[in-house]
Image (tube, rainbow, N blue to C red):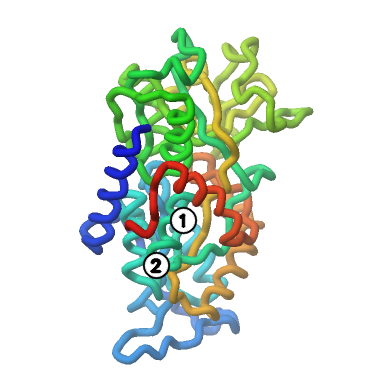
Amino acid sequence: MKTRAIWALIAVLALVIAACGDGTAESTTTAAATDTTAAPDTTAAPDTTAGEAELGSEERPIKVLFVPSVDAQIIVAGGEIMDEALTGATGLEFEVSVPTSYAATIEEMCANPTDTMGFIPAFGYVLASQLCQVDVGFKAVRFGWGVYWAQFLVPRDSDIESLEDLEGLTWAYPDPGSTSGFLFPSVSLDEAGVTPGETVEAGGHPQAALAVYSGEVDFATTFFSPPLIEGGEWQIGDSPEIPDELVESCAPVTEGESTQLWCGDYRVLDARASAIEDAPDIVQQVRILDITTEIPNDTLSFGPDFPADLRAQIEEALLAFAETPEWEESIGHQDFYAWSGIEPATDAEYDIVRTVVESQGISLDDL
């Protein structure tokens, strides 16, 4: 990726952040709890800011932001489930929304430093922490992994065998603010001396994978999570792709209300699994060319001035919610973010992302 393309991304982000609120969002607000006797003792202490309603009240709900990496309707529906669980545990009111882009999510958190919590990827977190001191609370765990990867997807019948073969080819990525969809692949392409041709901002990871499936582009970059293997375990250094002899067996399998993508005893968990409703044979048509180095998992972060007492209540409630079946219908769902759990995170864990940003010539001070 040429340095000027990265500076173009900086300019776009800077303009969006300066605009403060031009984007629209899909949202839903949980109705106020009517049974006050059922509220636990951890009900929020009043926010005493003069002239404002209490944070966490029906008049001033806590804003819960999700980046639009998958279908917004799926996020809103799963977000409602989380919303209800958190309200039941804390007595607080929440408003779930999906800003129009990764940059708009950062913008919203910086513009509302007291009222926001956001589920944002590593790159977004690094930008937000630099811009306005957004603070990480948790990171995702996916089937035991606290890290994930970016993957390069190409047509299975193509003669593309290495990153060098991508020179001049058309590239689909989810969003320029995506860590796995754009930032880390940009580094890999740069290191390989590759300059792609036309680029397509697909709007999400499944959409980027589908762009390869439909022949719209030559390659795409999305997230990679290791497959689950019955009777075995994927290890770092293993091939990220399904074994050749199992490819033809790949098909969606419905278990209860969940549809999973299985290839023999391999369960596919990378971005292709999120596209099976539109492309049930996507593994037969799209293969993984390569993956990048490990990336720290996505974050749950809080606005820089979010009240400490409310944050503690929410974190406790989220840890409890992660142990319930409802979690699997919310952020843990394969079509949502597929977080199988959460664990505490520190800012220092994301220094590797800062290093990558700096290696690409990006100075966060310039934002």
**Where 61 falls versus 5 (above or below)?**
below
Disc 2 and disc 1 in contact, CB within 8 angstroms: no
Quadrant in which the N terminus is drawn:
top left
Q: Please name the residue that numbered disc 2 is placed on.
A: 132
| Disc 1 element | helix
- Mark closest to the chain's N terminus, 2 or 1: 1
Disc 2 residue type (three-letter): Cys
Residue at the (59%, 29%) spot, across then down: 268
- Tell me, yes or no, if residue 259 can be seen here: no
Q: Please name the residue that numbered disc 1 is placed on.
A: 126
- Side of 86 relative to 142 (left or right): left
User: What is the quadrant of residue 19 in the picture?
Assistant: bottom left
Please name whichever residue, 222 or 33, is drawn nearer the observer in this view of the structure. Answer: 222
Tell me where residue 137 appears, x and y as whole percent. 56, 64
Quadrant in which the C terminus is drawn:
bottom left
Please name whichever residue, 350 or 222, is drawn nearer the observer in this view of the structure. Answer: 350
| Disc 2 element | helix
User: What is the quadrant of residue 245 in the picture?
Assistant: top right
Tell me where residue 362 appears, x and y as whole percent. 39, 48
Distance between mark 2 and mark 1 Cα atoms: 10 Å
**Where 163 falls versus 67 (above or below)?**
above
Q: Which mark is residue 67?
A: none
Circle 2 packing at 10 Å, graded few (<14), some (14-19), many (20+), is some
Residue at the (32%, 86%) spot, across then down: 52
